Amino acid sequence: MKNSNRKLETIAGRLKGNQINWNQVYYFSEIAAAGSIKEAAERLELTPSTLSLHLSQLEEDLEVQLFFRQHRKLTLTPEGTRLYQQAKTMFEAGQRLIDVVSPIPLGCYPVSVALVPSPSLSIANRVLGKLLQRQEPFNMKVFRADYAELEKGLSDSRFDFGFSDRIPERKDLVHQRVSQAFVKFYVAPKWADTPFSELLQRLPLLICNAVPSQRSLAEQALIDAELVPSAVVTSDYPSTLMDLCQQGAGIGVFSETPMQRMAMQGLTTLRIPQGAPKLQDNLFVLWAQGAENTAAVKLLQEALKEENFLGTA
């Protein structure tokens, strides 16, 4: 009975967080990432035998097999896969947290970026492209988010930075304007000389669901001008709306920058109708207050300044 009680106490102790050797969990995650004890040992500057011993000890402490071993090949077991996924996320978050407070940026985690759909999303894509071209290839995760998800993710250090067409409501976030552009109404050339108010009674308004802010801008502009469209066509596919607009079947609402680029390439001949209002669109980059020291935000700021993207707040 005494031996049985001692065994239960030992098992209970192993399951406590303060009894887990987190170095060994980190070693395990490096082995899983490398797919080889030898390669992971080189990265960690340990001998393969030492690393193998740590792995065996971790499996013994957790009472679970983490790898299938076939000769020199290692394959994660289902339990190992789950542990690796959680450990990877945990260590990346820890490295990002240290980056916030340390004077020496670690920068050894995937850069996590959130994008709120907006008419100026192509500008955000350009910024990311410049960022990726500044140094040796590194991992990046790009997420789609709404305004609330973006702000919470930045405050929780889940995202390194993000792009939005709105100034954040939270006071613990920093924002900087990246660009200022216009969203405009477009029609096929045959309708270019028809007054905009008349067109709204003859043609449907073409709106893309993929960019909610674009719809909001258009709706507000029409309200301000006291105009009401006779019909509205929405689509998740911008190309569908572009085709309809070029056919003369509706009034499109598109961002100015890509439209100018397409016109220069001879891909569109769309025109701005008479009397159509212009819709101003801003793109802001956001990050958590105090995150200026992180490797991700430092690289972002360098890329933005180099390309003269940054404007006023």
Image (cartoon, rainbow, N blue to C red):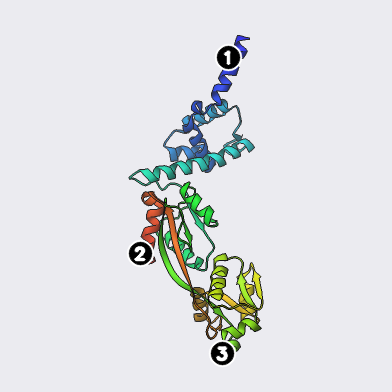
Q: CA distance from mark 2 to mark 1?
A: 64 Å
User: Label 1 amino acid?
Assistant: Arg
* Residue at the (60%, 9%) spot, across then down: 2
What residue is pinned by disc 1? 6
Q: What SS does tag 1 mark?
A: helix
* Quadrant assignment, res 192: bottom right
- Place of residue 185 in the rendered image (x, y in percent of width and height, measured from the top left): 55, 78
Quadrant containing the C terminus in the rendered view: bottom left
Question: What is the crowding at mark 2: few (fewer than 14 residues within 10 Å), some, or many (at least 20)?
Answer: few
The image shows residue 83 at horizontal and vertical percentages of 57, 37
Q: Amino acid at mark 2?
A: Glu
Asked whether the viewer can see residue 141, the reply is no
86 in relation to 278, above or below? above
Q: Position of residue 156 (x, y in %)?
A: 48, 46
Q: Is residue 143 above or below residue 30?
A: below
Tell me the amino acid under the disc marked 3.
Asp
The residue furthest top is: 2
In the image, which disc is placed on residue 193?
3
Pair 3/1: label in front = 3
The image quarter containing residue 193 is bottom right
Q: Residue shown at 46%/65% (left/top)?
A: 283
